[in-house]
Image: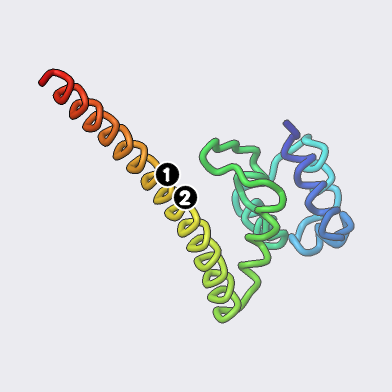
Amino acid sequence: MSTFGERLRAEREKQGYSQKQFAEALGITPTRLNYWEKDKREPDVLNIKKILDILKIDSDYLLGIDRNDNKFTEKERKLIKKYRLLDQRGQQAVEDTLNRELKYILDDKKQSNMSEIASDAIDTIDKISENMFKNQNDSVRKK
Protein backbone atom coordinates (compact mmCIF):
# COMPACT_ATOMS: atom_id res chain seq x y z
CA MET A 1 0.00 0.00 0.00
CA SER A 2 1.23 3.49 -0.76
CA THR A 3 2.16 5.99 1.92
CA PHE A 4 0.31 9.15 2.89
CA GLY A 5 2.87 11.27 1.06
CA GLU A 6 2.65 9.17 -2.10
CA ARG A 7 -1.16 9.38 -2.15
CA LEU A 8 -1.04 13.14 -1.49
CA ARG A 9 1.47 13.76 -4.27
CA ALA A 10 -0.42 11.51 -6.72
CA GLU A 11 -3.73 13.30 -6.09
CA ARG A 12 -2.12 16.75 -6.28
CA GLU A 13 -0.48 15.91 -9.61
CA LYS A 14 -3.62 14.21 -10.94
CA GLN A 15 -5.53 17.42 -10.37
CA GLY A 16 -2.87 19.54 -12.06
CA TYR A 17 -1.43 21.40 -9.08
CA SER A 18 2.28 22.15 -8.91
CA GLN A 19 3.82 21.89 -5.45
CA LYS A 20 4.03 25.68 -5.30
CA GLN A 21 0.38 26.17 -6.34
CA PHE A 22 -0.90 23.59 -3.89
CA ALA A 23 1.23 24.95 -1.04
CA GLU A 24 -0.16 28.43 -1.71
CA ALA A 25 -3.73 27.07 -1.71
CA LEU A 26 -3.04 25.43 1.66
CA GLY A 27 -1.31 28.52 3.05
CA ILE A 28 1.98 26.72 3.71
CA THR A 29 5.47 26.75 2.24
CA PRO A 30 6.39 24.42 -0.63
CA THR A 31 9.10 23.00 1.66
CA ARG A 32 6.51 21.89 4.21
CA LEU A 33 4.42 20.26 1.45
CA ASN A 34 7.56 18.54 0.15
CA TYR A 35 8.19 17.09 3.63
CA TRP A 36 4.64 15.73 3.70
CA GLU A 37 4.94 14.21 0.25
CA LYS A 38 8.26 12.58 1.15
CA ASP A 39 6.77 11.25 4.43
CA LYS A 40 9.32 13.17 6.53
CA ARG A 41 6.53 14.95 8.41
CA GLU A 42 2.74 14.76 8.63
CA PRO A 43 0.17 17.54 8.44
CA ASP A 44 -2.00 18.40 11.42
CA VAL A 45 -5.74 17.82 11.39
CA LEU A 46 -6.58 21.32 10.13
CA ASN A 47 -4.22 20.94 7.17
CA ILE A 48 -5.58 17.48 6.38
CA LYS A 49 -9.06 19.01 6.28
CA LYS A 50 -7.79 21.74 3.90
CA ILE A 51 -6.20 19.08 1.67
CA LEU A 52 -9.47 17.13 1.54
CA ASP A 53 -11.47 20.29 0.79
CA ILE A 54 -9.17 21.46 -1.99
CA LEU A 55 -8.67 18.08 -3.66
CA LYS A 56 -12.21 16.88 -2.91
CA ILE A 57 -10.99 13.38 -2.12
CA ASP A 58 -12.08 10.79 0.40
CA SER A 59 -10.38 10.99 3.80
CA ASP A 60 -10.14 7.20 4.08
CA TYR A 61 -8.17 7.06 0.84
CA LEU A 62 -5.82 9.89 1.80
CA LEU A 63 -5.20 8.43 5.26
CA GLY A 64 -4.77 4.89 3.96
CA ILE A 65 -7.79 3.51 5.80
CA ASP A 66 -9.05 0.34 4.17
CA ARG A 67 -12.66 -0.41 5.06
CA ASN A 68 -13.75 -3.73 3.61
CA ASP A 69 -17.40 -2.71 3.58
CA ASN A 70 -16.74 0.49 1.63
CA LYS A 71 -14.42 -0.40 -1.23
CA PHE A 72 -15.11 1.59 -4.35
CA THR A 73 -13.41 1.05 -7.65
CA GLU A 74 -11.78 4.03 -9.32
CA LYS A 75 -14.71 4.13 -11.77
CA GLU A 76 -17.21 4.20 -8.88
CA ARG A 77 -15.30 7.02 -7.15
CA LYS A 78 -15.33 9.04 -10.39
CA LEU A 79 -19.07 8.49 -10.79
CA ILE A 80 -19.70 9.62 -7.21
CA LYS A 81 -17.59 12.76 -7.78
CA LYS A 82 -19.56 13.54 -10.94
CA TYR A 83 -22.87 12.92 -9.15
CA ARG A 84 -21.89 15.36 -6.40
CA LEU A 85 -21.15 18.05 -9.00
CA LEU A 86 -24.70 17.84 -10.38
CA ASP A 87 -27.46 20.18 -9.25
CA GLN A 88 -30.61 18.79 -7.65
CA ARG A 89 -32.29 18.26 -11.04
CA GLY A 90 -29.30 16.32 -12.36
CA GLN A 91 -29.06 14.18 -9.23
CA GLN A 92 -32.78 13.40 -9.49
CA ALA A 93 -32.33 12.38 -13.14
CA VAL A 94 -29.52 9.98 -12.14
CA GLU A 95 -31.64 8.51 -9.33
CA ASP A 96 -34.61 8.10 -11.68
CA THR A 97 -32.43 6.32 -14.24
CA LEU A 98 -30.95 4.01 -11.59
CA ASN A 99 -34.39 3.18 -10.22
CA ARG A 100 -35.74 2.48 -13.72
CA GLU A 101 -32.80 0.19 -14.57
CA LEU A 102 -33.08 -1.66 -11.25
CA LYS A 103 -36.80 -2.15 -11.87
CA TYR A 104 -36.02 -3.73 -15.25
CA ILE A 105 -33.56 -6.10 -13.60
CA LEU A 106 -35.99 -7.00 -10.80
CA ASP A 107 -38.85 -7.49 -13.27
CA ASP A 108 -36.64 -9.79 -15.37
CA LYS A 109 -35.70 -11.77 -12.26
CA LYS A 110 -39.35 -12.02 -11.21
CA GLN A 111 -40.26 -13.18 -14.70
CA SER A 112 -37.45 -15.72 -14.62
CA ASN A 113 -38.50 -16.91 -11.16
CA MET A 114 -42.13 -17.17 -12.30
CA SER A 115 -41.03 -19.26 -15.28
CA GLU A 116 -39.06 -21.55 -12.97
CA ILE A 117 -42.01 -21.82 -10.58
CA ALA A 118 -44.38 -22.57 -13.47
CA SER A 119 -41.98 -25.16 -14.85
CA ASP A 120 -41.67 -26.80 -11.43
CA ALA A 121 -45.45 -26.76 -11.02
CA ILE A 122 -45.94 -28.43 -14.42
CA ASP A 123 -43.35 -31.09 -13.51
CA THR A 124 -45.14 -31.70 -10.21
CA ILE A 125 -48.54 -31.93 -11.90
CA ASP A 126 -47.08 -34.36 -14.46
CA LYS A 127 -45.68 -36.56 -11.68
CA ILE A 128 -48.97 -36.49 -9.79
CA SER A 129 -50.87 -37.34 -12.98
CA GLU A 130 -48.48 -40.22 -13.73
CA ASN A 131 -48.89 -41.57 -10.20
CA MET A 132 -52.67 -41.23 -10.36
CA PHE A 133 -52.76 -42.99 -13.74
CA LYS A 134 -50.45 -45.72 -12.45
CA ASN A 135 -52.55 -46.15 -9.30
CA GLN A 136 -55.75 -46.38 -11.38
CA ASN A 137 -54.19 -48.99 -13.66
CA ASP A 138 -52.96 -50.97 -10.66
CA SER A 139 -56.38 -50.96 -9.04
CA VAL A 140 -58.06 -52.02 -12.35
CA ARG A 141 -55.62 -54.94 -12.70
CA LYS A 142 -56.31 -56.06 -9.15
CA LYS A 143 -60.04 -56.34 -9.86
Residue type for callout 2 = Ser
Residue highlighted by disc 1: 116
Side of 91 where 78 appears, left or right: right
Side of 89 where 76 appears, left or right: right
Residue type for callout 1 = Glu
With respect to residue 128, does 83 lie above or below? below
Residue drawn at x 65%, y 44% as measured from the top left: 61
Residue drawn at x 81%, y 54% as measured from the top left: 12
Residue 47 percent location from the top left of the image:
66, 53
C-beta proximity under 8 Å, tags 1 and 2: yes
Choose between 62 and 93: the one closer to the eye: 93
Residue 24 percent location from the top left of the image:
81, 63
Corner quadrant of residue 19: bottom right
Residue highlighted by disc 2: 112
Corner quadrant of residue 55: bottom right
| Disc 1 to disc 2, C-alpha distance | 6 Å
Quarter of the rendering occupied by the C terminus? top left
As helix, strand or loop, the secondary structure at mark 2 comes to: helix
Residue farthest to the bottom, as pictured: 89
Residue 72 percent location from the top left of the image:
62, 46
Choose between 108 and 20: the one closer to the eye: 108
